[in-house]
Amino acid sequence: MSKTFSGKNIVKVLRRKGFVVDHQRGSHIFMHNLEKNISVVVPLHKEIKKGTLSNIIKKAGLTIDELKDLV
């Protein structure tokens, strides 16, 4: 994972994959996919850390290649 992703990038990708913004608390956006009943929390930071990014990808059911293509 050489490319860095911001929170805004991830929110944009998740919206394309059917997630909607549930609510926001501080700098964290809580997103939910009603069809798959999956919830994901995305921090709105300039750069998402590697572990956090991999956790978001796993929960959302994406791959890193899909994420790169959709950004």
Image: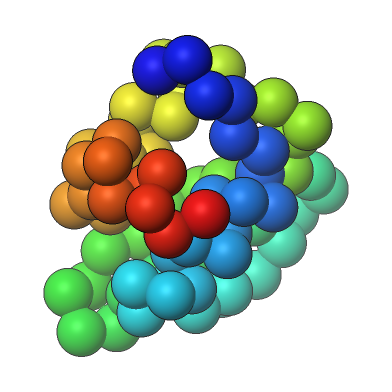
Residue most extreme to the front:
69
In this rendering, the answer to whether 42 lies above or below 22 is above
Instruction: Tell me: 12 left or right of 55.
Output: right
Q: Position of residue 67 (x, y in %)?
A: 37, 47
Which quarter of the picture shows residue 57? top left
Q: Position of residue 46 (x, y in %)?
A: 78, 32
Q: Position of residue 41 (x, y in %)?
A: 51, 48
In this rendering, the answer to whether 37 lies above or below 35 is above
Instruction: Tell me: 39 left or right of 29.
Output: left
Q: Position of residue 54 (x, y in %)?
A: 34, 27
In this rendering, the answer to whether 14 lies above or below 55 is below
Instruction: Tell me: 43 left or right of 70.
Output: right
Q: How many marks?
A: 0
In this rendering, the answer to whether 51 lies above or below 35 is above
Which quarter of the picture shows residue 29? bottom right
Q: Residue at x 41, y 44 (%)?
A: 68
Q: Residue at x 82, y 48 (%)?
A: 26
Residue most extreme to the bottom:
35
Q: Is residue 52 visible?
A: yes
Q: Quadrant of the N terminus?
A: top left
User: Which one is nearer the viewer's eye here, 4 or 15?
Assistant: 4
- The way the protein has been coloured in the rendering is rainbow
Which quarter of the picture shows residue 36? bottom left
Q: Residue at x 43, y 75 (%)?
A: 16
Q: Is residue 30 visible?
A: no
